[in-house]
Structures are given as structure tokens and as C-alpha cells.
Image: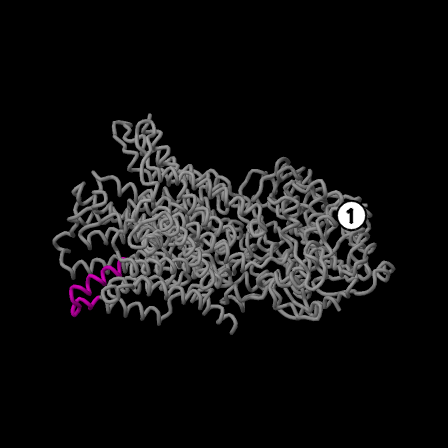
Amino acid sequence: MMLSIRSISAGYGPARVLFDLNLELRAGEISVILGRNGAGKSTTLKTVMAMVPLSGGQIWFSGKRIDQRSTWEIARAGMGYVPEERRIFPDLSVLENLEAGRRLPHGRAPSWSVARIFKLLPALAPLGERRAGTLSGGEQQMLAVARTLMGNPSCLLLDEPSEGLAPAVVELLATLVRTLRGEGMAVLLAEQNVRFALAVSDTAHIIEKGGLRFSGTARQLQERADLRAEYLAL
Amino acid sequence: MTILRVEGISKSYSGALALDNLSFELQAGEIIAMIGPNGAGKTTCFNILHGQLRADSGQVFVGDACTSRMDTPAILRLGVGRTFQIAATFHSFTVAENVQMALLARRGLLWNLHSQAGDLCRKEADQLLEQLGMLAHAARACSVLSYGDLKRVELAMALAGDPILLLMDEPTAGMAPRERLQLMALVVRLARERKLSVLFTEHDMDIVFAHADRILLLEQGRLICQGTPAMVRADPRAQRAYLGDNRD
Amino acid sequence: MSSFVLQFLNGLTSASTLFMVAAGLSLIFGITRVLNFAHGSMYMLGIYLAYSAIGAFSVGGVLTPVAFWGGILCAAVLVGMVGALVELTVLRRVYRSPELFQLLATFGVVLLTKDLVLWFWGPEDLLGPRAPGLGGAVEILGSPFPEYDLFLIVVGPLILGLLWLLLHSTRWGLLIRAATQDREMAAALGINQKLLFTSTFALGAFLAGLGGALQIPREPAQHFLDFTVIVDAFVVVVVGGMGSIPGAFLAALLIGEVKALCIGIGEIGAFGFGISLPKLTLVVESLVMAAVLIFRPWGLMGRALAVLPDAGEARPLLARNTAATRMAGVAIVAALAITPAFANQYSLVLLVDILIFALFAASLHFLMGPSGMASFGHAAYFGLGAYAAALAFKQAGLPMEISILVGPLVAVLAALSFGWFCVRLSGVYLAMLTLAFAQITWSVIYQWDGFTGGSNGLVGVWPAPWLSGRISYFYLVLLLCGGAVLILRRIIFSPFGYALRACRDSPMRAAAIGINVSRFQWMAFLVAGGFAGLAGALFAFSKGSISPEVLAIGQSVDGLVMVLLGGVQTISGPLVGAAVFTWLQELVARHIDYWRALLGMIIIVIVVAFPHGIVGQLFSRNRAKE
């Protein structure tokens, strides 16, 4: 098991968001967390990154317990995280953003370089010297993903990557995610865009009110209109 | 009787339109939910209604008074109370003191350097706390309360202003599922008892469909549909907004 | 014309030094968000170390260029190492503590460094050698200008260029810039912050040390440089924008030139008064800062700070009087009241001091505790109270009893005008503006020789005959200070005091129930200023003389230490803090030469052992029980 979230509870100050949540992710698997906004999707990813304090439960990653580690140690262990707000460094150029994310993996050859990023995401290539803060939303999203890939992660957490993007960019993103799976990377998405999510994922989870409501294959969920209506639609 | 009338308000932040020509009405005693994806403009709308922000254009009426140019204290005096998404209480006060503060502020008794604040408005505060089932906690510090109880304290503070209209920003966010239902049932009971109108935003659809008389659905600053829960549920535009299919 | 040009060059010289110190401070703040009061101490260490290193390298007393420049570099490197040490041993442990606590930790380092310097180098000014080869002067428009100053003018832009290269063409610099923009995201990309913070501290301290060391041919090493320099550096950083290196350079130029311009213009006549601008450089400097803060709250090239995750400052309930605390209060007052029966003159003098500073600390606490506004310049009100009372007595010839009331009155007026500006800002920026106003006040008093006696101060400020005895004056002070402290306590528990705490706890909620937050905060300044002024007036008459020291930054810092040491969360804490501090200063200073170092050590130990504050610690323990 690549990532194993074992009955965690978490929240901000006295406010609780996650209640006893369980979730698992295998190597080379693309999995999506679905749920309405406010359900706890982002908080789940942030808790894995130790950016939200855990109040109960354990998190295991590649056979090691990581819930007592600090954010940078988790990142160095091979966990890549792309936040919902993208959080690129606005005053740095595109190339500098990529350099800030560069990190060599332990004991294997790096699979990511600027050249490879630009090949896969050709839209970024001519923007190398541009200040990242001046990029469009879609370009910033590409950059945020690329910056994290430069750290050669073995697992990628993507928080609402399709939010606010044009359909063509969403399609590009889907292609990218499939490419990553081809290389054995595990990807955990948090999404509201059900169609995009189910199109790229192997497995799907639904969370609502901070707890897991469904876990299964994307195909199963595709067939369960009742579940979608209950937890995702109005 | 119309309690709140919003006429075509718009607001933009550095070019981005947060609210786009929003209009709706709220009748006395009505409970309305405002829903929509993140960034739909719900909080902006609340901030305008409560005087923390000014709309770029459009007007807001509470009763007959136009509040578009009023500041928060003036709007409070018209009887508009508010609770926040993340419960905001005074954490170095006891539960009772929080409610007393709200009462003192409402009655303009704060410019007083002599009396002991802890002794003022105590009885009224206790009455309010009793209505909310919080009397047993009156002497406890807010910082040690559970989040659900904190939300109740906040509600008591809003009610201390004797409002005719209550704005509640995600009243059940951050609470355990059982607490959510209890709190919302309480809000509805109090609203009915006090003939109070409530406008709330909420992500929990069980709460929305169980308690709202009407629903307003916002997306990207625009009101895309409104009506009774059954009407909204049946509206294809609403389903699209929630399932994300409108993007492709 | 030529004097004008020379003044302009002088401005450039001082701008270079200012920039070196401020750049380090700005760099440190940008990445760690710690306002490092000890940065001035690093500058001072730089001068002293350069003095000794050059001496040590001058074999047989012969000053060679190698000895001189080697000594300066060696001093700067040593200071850099000290900076790293301070980060590793003290600051690393308090990054998650409340802001005020971090400040207290750096105060501890200031006190410790000060006494280390006194112990090692002694109290005398130490004059360093001239730079070999740069000891002469060049002719500029017919007037001589020191070669070394010309060299310094070049050094400033050179350092800016090197820093720019370091930040823009090394990976380390890139990570610094990334972490300054978004610390949390940098961590999520696997950037090790510990290493980054320590190295930034080392670099910042190195720059301050270098700035100091390079001063050795121009000014003597003095043990009060730490405070004068830190104030200048703060002004530059705030004007330029926290965390912005080009901003610091621009601001250093601006401040340096404004000062030089004042000196260049000299005396001007306006409205029939002669105003001597050279004497008002500090005023002008502070006015520039105040203006920038009001019109560009984030500085010339700064931007609004990203909100860091809340440090979670624990604030307990304020306990109302119980029978036991009331008894204890009565007992203490009773004990004080019978003291004159068996205390000697010396103890009475000390007790008077303690009572006066207890009121001073209580008034500062009123701002920092219930009102939640840190003031770095509270001595302004204390000093204005003292001076107003003394001047009313000496210059206006009012009786002493009336003069004592003039003190707080003037302090209230000052608080009204300063406070009006201050409450428009918050946090560190508010604190810096209070400091600026205090510096303005200090320099007006200091430099207005004819009226205030300038640096000599005023003498012959004695109480009326019926109060002239030690014992009767003690009772007057006990009555007024005791009464004032009780009134302050009463105000804290009044609706007004509750409203202030409400504004501090949650400005958003306070506004939502209809409280005009900034108006209440403004009035808090008035109350705190008035009571500090009363303490100042009593102080003036207790000593018989006053000097500008009473409103210098050292006095403000003493107040801060009293409050923070005793605990900002309690009402009695600052009183205890004032008593302990004053007692240490008066008594221990007689027996232990290095009492400041002792205090500094105590502060550091407390901060490291209780990173959430002593009271905060107790509070969280209670909370765990519940």
C-alpha cells in the first residue's frame, strides 16, 4: 500500500472537519475523492501533508508512519502536493518556480527535468522567464503541477486541479495524469468535477461531513446514479 | 411583509466580478438558504448585507430603510444580526460574558469606566443562554467549549441584538453530523418562536433541504435559480452547477 | 553649494551603513517573521570585535592593510557565527510562540550581549585606527572629504549588488525568496526550513557585523550603539517594506539623505521662530517613517504580509477579585503603609521607584494586555509626564501640586494625537509607529536646549515643603500610584475594558455586535498614556531632576521587559515584573556588576522552557485537565 490513512480526525482549532476517516491508495493507482464543497476533501490532503493538525488516527506512506513528521520531511519522503489555490511563488519566474521544487529522489535516477516538463506541457516552454504571478489561471495550474513533479515524488496529491479551467486545459490535465500512472506514480485527486474525475480515475471515494460514504472502482460509481444523487448532486 | 430586499447588487475585486446583479427578497419569518460552489459570492453578499463591504452598484433595503450606505452599527440597530463561518467569540471571556458584551453593545452601555461589566445584563444573558440550552456552561471559558457549543454562544450573541433578520454564514461547518442537525433544529425553532427571518449559507445539503423554505443558488456571483427545495432539486441548471458538467 | 554637495555625500555614507544593517534585519524578518531586536547588538559586536581583531592582527603594534581588512572581515564572520548560535539556541524554539514572546527572547539576547560587551571591553569608548591607505581626504569643490567615507559610499551599492546576485543566482537565494513568499508551500516542496532559517540569521548577523566593523575608523565603539542602531534599522526596514532588500536600500538612501539635508540646510526661520534643523534629524526621520506608514502601510516596496497559521496564543479569563485576592491586596497595601516605621532612607527611595514603575508597567500592560496593542514607545508618555510636570514647575512657576497634574494632562494630549495614527495599523507596524512617535518626542526634548535643558535635563524639581520629607513623599506616591493601579484594574473590568478585550479577541465579532473597534483602541491609548504620565510626573519630583533618559528607548524597553516578564495575561503580573526588575536594577546592580546579563539569561531560559508564556503554560495545563 502506497498511502494508508487510518481513521484520522482533524480540523482547525476547535472546529472538526474529518471524523474517523479511512482511505487507501496503491502504487500506480489513480484515485479520486469526491464530495461537495465543505465535505473535507482539501482537509484530507492537507492533513496528509501535516498542514492541518491531526487529532487522532495514523497515516502511513510507503511502509513508514508519517503523521508525526513535519511537512518538509513528508515532502522529502516522496509525497508531492499541489494545493487548490496553486500557490505558485508569484515573484519568481516560471523556471525559478521549477527550480524551487527540484529535488533528487533517494536511490533512483530522477525522472523529471525542466526539458521533460516543457515537452509534456509545451504551453509552459515559452514562458520560462515570465514572472509566475502574471500567468493565466490555467498556466498557473500547469506550473503548480510541474513544480511538484520536479521533486520526483512517488505519490501525488492534487487538490481540485480542474477548478476554474477551460475544457481544453482540463483535457490536457487528464492526459498528464494518465501519463503519470503509466510511470507507476500514485495519484490522489480531490475533485468536484465528477466527469473529469471519473474519466481519469481507477478508484473513487465519496466523503461527506468528514467521513467516508463510498469506496469502490470508478466504474462502480459510474453505475451508481443513486450515490451520485445522494452525495454529489442536490 | 418584506424584511429584506436586495436590488441588483454587484461587487468586483480588482476586476473580478464577485457578485453580478444579484436580486432577491426575504419575507418575515422566512428561512432561506443560499447555496453554491466556493467562490460563488455568498460571503461577499453577507458582508455587503451587514455593512462590512459596500456594493459597487445596486441597493439593499431592510424593511423600508435603504442600508446600502450604512455601516455595521447602524444596520445592527435595524435588527440584522450575524454569525460567522468560523465561530467568532471572545475567547478570554466566559460564555455569559460573551452574551453580556453583545447586550451591552446593543444598548450602548460600553462607554462606562466604572461599573463592573460582569454584573451588567447578567439576567438577560442567562435567559438567552437558557433558550439555547447553554445555561449550564455560563461560567465556563469559551476557549474550552466544544465547537458545537461555541456556535450556540455565537448564536446567543446574535440574538442578544434582538434581530428581525439573522444572517448565518455556514452555521454547521466544522461540527459533527449529529451536532449539525441539533443546532439547525434549534435555529428553526427559535426563528419560528421569535418570528425571525433567517438567511443562511450551507454546504450540508441535508440541512438545506430539511430546513430551508426557499433556496437561492449562486454561481460565479449570479443567481442561477431559486425556489422551494423541490423546485431547485428538479432544476437541471442546479444539477449541472453541482456535478461540474457545465464546464465541458 | 559645496557644503550642500558634501552633505549629500555624507548622506550617502550613512545610507551605506544603514543599508547593511537594515538589509540583514529585513532578510531575517522576511523569512522567519521574527522582529529581531538583537540585530543592533550584532552591529555593536561588529565594531568591538573589529577593534580587537585589528589589534590582534597588528603584530608588534604595526597596522598593516592585511591586519585592518583581515580584522574587519574576521569580525563580521564572527558576528555571523554568533547570529547562527542565537538562532540555534534561542529563536529556533520560539518560532511557534506568540509574537511578543519572540520579541522578549530577542530582548534577552540584547541584555546578555550588552553585558558581555561591558565585561569584555569595559565601559570606555574605544577608538579604532584609521584605514591604511584611506586615511586622508580628497578635495571636493574646494572642501576636504574623507577618503574612507568615499569608500563606504561605494560599499553600500556593492553589498546590494552582491546580495542581489546571491539571492538571484544561487539555489540558496532562490529558496530564500521562495520561502519569503510562501513559507508553508516551500515546506510542502520539501525545503528544509531549519537550515534556511539558521543560514539567513547567520547572513543577516554577518551583514550587521560588517556594517559595524566598517565603522571602526569613523566612530568609537560604544556600549549603547545597540539601541541607537536598532531604531535606525527598524525605521529603514519599515519605510522600505519588511522583507524587501531593494526597499531597504531605497529607504536607507532616503533616510540618510533626509538627515544630511537637515544638517545641510541648517537654521531656518519660520513664523518668527528659528528652527534648527540639524538638531531635529531624528524628528524628521521619524516623521518620514510615520508618513510612509500612514500612506503606504506596508512600506515603499513591501506588500501585505501573508497571514501565517495562527500561533494560537492562549488567553485565559481574567479572574475577578475573590475574598482571598482582596485580602492579599489589602495586606500588601497595609504592609507598604507601615514600612516607613522601620525602613531606612535607602529602602524608601527604592520603594518609591518600585511604586512608580509598577504604575508605568500597569499602564503599558493596559495597552498590551486587554487592548492587545504592543507599544515599543511607552516611555514617550512617561517622559512627557515627567517633563511637563517639571516644566510647569520650573518654567511656568506653578505650584508642585498643580504641576503633578499637568504631567498626565500633557501625556493624555500626546496619546490622543499619537494614538489616532497608531490605531490605523496593527501588529508589528503599530508597534513600530509607537516607537517612531517616542523617538520624535525624545529628540524634541533632547535637542530643545533652551526650554528643556537638552541633554543636561532639568534640576531642582523638588516637592513642596510639606511633601519634601522622604516619608511624606512615599505616602503621596503610595496613595497616587496605588489608587491609579486600582482605577486601571477597575477599568479593565468595566464595560469599556471588556469592549477593549473584545476588540482584541475578535475584531470581526466586535464589529459585528456594533463596537467601533478603532475608536475604543484610540481611547485605550488615552487611558494608558495618562497613567504613564502620572507615573512620570511623580518620578520627576522624586528624583529632583530629570534627563532625556526618561523617554529614551531604553526606558520603553525596560517597561516591555517588566510587563512581559511578569506576564501580559494577568493584571498583577506587570506589577510583580516591575518590582522584580526595579529591585534587580537597584539592589543587585550594586553587588553584581552584570545584572543585565543575569536578567537576559533568566528571560532566555523562561522563553525556551515555556515557549507559550508562563501563564499560557499554566493555562494550557488547566485546559488539559478540563
Viewer-side residue, B23 vs A99: A99
Q: Which residues are magenta?
A: C337-356
For disc 1, the marked residue is A170
Position of residue C556 measured from the top left corner of the image (x, y, whole percent): 33, 53
Left or right for C247, reference C474: right
**Magenta stretch contains residue C120:** no
Instruction: Identify the element where label 1 is drawn.
Output: helix
Position of residue A149 measured from the top left corner of the image (x, y, whole percent): 71, 54
Position of residue A136 measured from the top left corner of the image (x, y, whole percent): 69, 41
Q: Residues within 10 Å of mark 1 (few under 14, many from 20)?
A: some
Left or right for C290, reference A178: left
Q: Residue at x 26, y 43 (%)?
A: C446
Viewer-side residue, B99 vs A53: A53
Magenta residues: mostly which secondary structure?
helix
Q: Is residue B221 above or below residue C318?
A: above
In this orientation, does residue B92 appear? no
